[in-house]
Image (cartoon, rainbow, N blue to C red):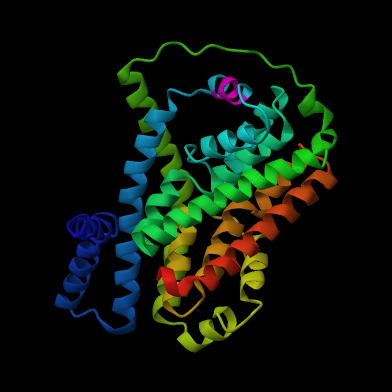
Amino acid sequence: MEWIRAGWLVFQDQVLGMKWLNELIGNGLAAVGLDGTLGGIVQFFLYDTIKIFVLLSVLIFGISYVQSYFPPHRTKKILGRFQGLWANVVAALLGTVTPFCSCSSIPIFMGFTSAGLPVGVTFSFLISSPMVDLGSLVLLMSVFGTRVAVLYVLLGLVIAVIGGTLLQKLGMERYVEDFIRHAPHIESQSSTLTRRDRVDYAKGQLVNTVKKVAPYVFLGVGIGALIHNVVPQNWVEMVLGSQNPLAVILATLVGVPMYADIFGTIPVAESLLFKGAGLGTVLSFMMAVTTLSLPSLIMLKQAVKSRLLAAFIGICTLGIILVGYFFNAIQVLLV
């Protein structure tokens, strides 16, 4: 078992984490005389940008290829076979294989709702899709390690399942806008795709996704580089460290109005953790940014009434805060 563990650590550090790339960039910058604070900023920016885009490209292509077997009407049929809690679980799991940000997930949520799926099931999908997709799992493993990444995804799925179930139990179905509930739904059958068709689809999804997330990746890595090399560690520890009992709540509330893909928030979270922020604090910030961004809430407001929107925000916010405090409590065991 020890050789398996050692092999996995090498895979995690050198393949997913690309530590060799960081060393290569550092040596190259040192050779041209670029060191100190400026060298550290450039090294962090180049390393994280290249790593994220390489992993992102591989992941999105693979996920999209698999997703080509599950068009929306087929996904709706799968969800329609399950009832009760199991329907929420399946919806949350299906959300993990859709590489969408919160804004991209909302049109799919609308389509599922207009097709007659229970509102609790569709909200389980809406919560899990931006928060815990497979791409985030791999990137989290490359930064925070396997245990943190797996636990993050599992707890994200728990929030999605519980959140959707509570909304269903609270009878929130009646707070979906009428034009969504009564929208005409045309059942379509996708033509049989060849392997070439699926490859082309995956390529298209890859290009579109990279174009969409690239600005946030560059911005996130840039902010992360500055935090990592410029912001004093005692500042971060004072505001976001474990000694501040309100750090998780503050990070969650700060993250809600922002809009960024998880690929752009991970470099910021990585730098904050390096500077002394609590693990749960930075993970709560990531969850809030990706799940409850202001643009996505504005879009969602067009489809649901204020009471349902408020319940959705409240349940997700509470779940994210609880997850943050849980991670802070067990941080010593994970890092």
Left or right placement of residue 102 versus residue 211 in this view: right
Can residue 232 be seen from the camera position used here?
no
**Residue 56 image offset from top left, x and y in percent:** 37, 47
Residue at the far front: name it: 1
Residue drawn at x 44%, y 29% is 67
Magenta segment's dominant SS is helix
Q: Residue at x 22, y 59 (%)?
A: 14
Residue 115 appears in the picture as rendered:
yes
Q: At x 14% / y 76%, what residue is drawn? A: 31
Report the span colored magenta: 75-79
**Vertical arrangement, residue 319 with respect to residue 240, above or below:** above
Up the image or down, 203 lies above or below 237; here it is above
Q: Quadrant of the C terminus?
A: bottom left
Looking at the rendering, in which quadrant would you find the N terminus?
bottom left
Identify which residue, 316 or 52, lies in the foreground: 316
Question: Observer-nearest residue: 235 or 229?
Answer: 235
Percent position of residue 314, x then y: 75, 55
The correct choice, above or below, for 232 with respect to 181 in the image is below
> Does 20 sit above or below residue 162?
below
Whether residue 120 is in magenta: the answer is no
Residue 97's spot in the image, x, y percent? 47, 37
Q: Position of residue 127 (x, y in %)?
A: 62, 45
Q: Quadrant of residue 197?
A: top left
